[in-house]
Amino acid sequence: MAELHVLGQLKSAHNFQEKFSLFCRYSFQAGPNWTIVGGIPESQTISAKPDYTKTAIWAQSLDVHYVTRGIQGWPKLVLQIGCLDSLGRTWTVGYSCCTLPAVPGHHVIEVSCWLPTATSLTDRIREYFLGGSHQLLHSDIINIGIDRYKLKTISKGTVELNIDIILRNFAQFGVEYK
Amino acid sequence: MTENDITKFLVTFSGQIEHVLFPAGVFDDQLYIHYEIVWGPDWSPVSGLTTGRSQMACSGTDPERVVFNMPIDLLFSSTNVYGWPQIVVTVRAHNAFGGDSLRGYGLFLLPSSPGMRTETAPLLRPRPATLLGEWFTWITGKSPELVDPKMLASGKENHLLRSESYGCVTAVLSMVAKDMRKLGYDNQPPICSGACHAHR
């Protein structure tokens, strides 16, 4: 069976407008042929306070070892960025999803994030004064493209990822990746 | 030894931790760094120093930069890529009263493909969890520290930690591997022009 190693760092978040600490819940999602044999597929980063350039540093190290029987459903990384205020309240400030590169070597990836907006005026006023946000009930919508037309979203900041890919035995099974 | 007998691959890392940069200037006369290498279960160090401490350094004509040029030279052997080695750099400062305080932690993943790489890791510092702790930090100038900085490299169970960041540390690292390709691994980026620049 072919193996895929994903190494790297979930490095930082840029240009989120929140003044409070940011954290990120992430999970690796892959098709049914893929199994994880080493590493943590789902975790949460530290909550980092954005600096004067609106950059929050997480430096979360990623290390996942996949074994696969087919190339269908190449792994994706699903991100959910949260915000922790000074009173200890948390809410979601962004969702995003990115496909992991299939080419070996070092990759720097910028992932753009989005968030469901407040649709009614009362919701908007409440968000402005009390904080908080709308969030998704079903998180499948982040990495699956169906039923998105009902959503109204707003653009948020970006997340920087450094990913190193190492493949094993893919060429042996005739997979052409470069 | 025939090709079928090979179960281990060897990886050497060499390079140096070049400098630390604080964009608002360095206010410490005695800054030093301490590095630790963290590796996974299937890895074992063969030669080289896996922990080290640098000289005391201060800034020169450039008031933002402190040069350390701390060399790193390591040889690892492993049977599995999982648990690829990482460096945790701790930047600390001595002050005039003999105290010792933290300036930040930086985390590098050692390069996984051959070639020279210049990497910059931002420095992060834990933040006090309570208001009382914040006052204590402000009065004494001592910020909270991690008991074991290696927990940053493991990447698990750190979601209760709050941090802020200031400054960065730069390292130049290169990697050479032996027998990785014989074991079926492919870590070579393709040689191409134009089309694959989108990924860099």
Image (cartoon, rainbow, N blue to C red):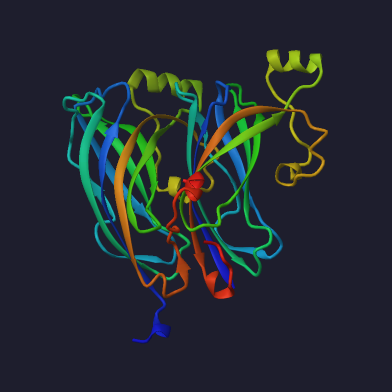
In the image: residue A163, left or right of residue A75: left
| Foreground pick, B132 / B85 | B85
Can residue A9 be seen here? The reply is no
Q: Residue furthest front?
A: B194
**What x and y, as percent, mark residue A128?**
69, 14
Q: Residue furthest bottom?
A: B2
| Foreground pick, A7 / A101 | A101
In the image: residue B156, left or right of residue B1: right
**What x and y, as percent, mark residue B196?**
49, 50
Q: Is residue A117 above or below residue B49?
A: above
Q: Is residue B112 above or below residue B88?
A: below
**What x and y, as percent, mark residue A130?**
70, 16
Tell how many labels.
0
The structure residue drawn at horizontal position 57% and vertical position 66%, both measured from the top left corner, is A176
State which quadrant residue B61 falls in.
Answer: top left
The structure residue drawn at horizontal position 26% and vertical position 51%, both measured from the top left corner, is B15
In the image: residue B134, left or right of residue A133: left
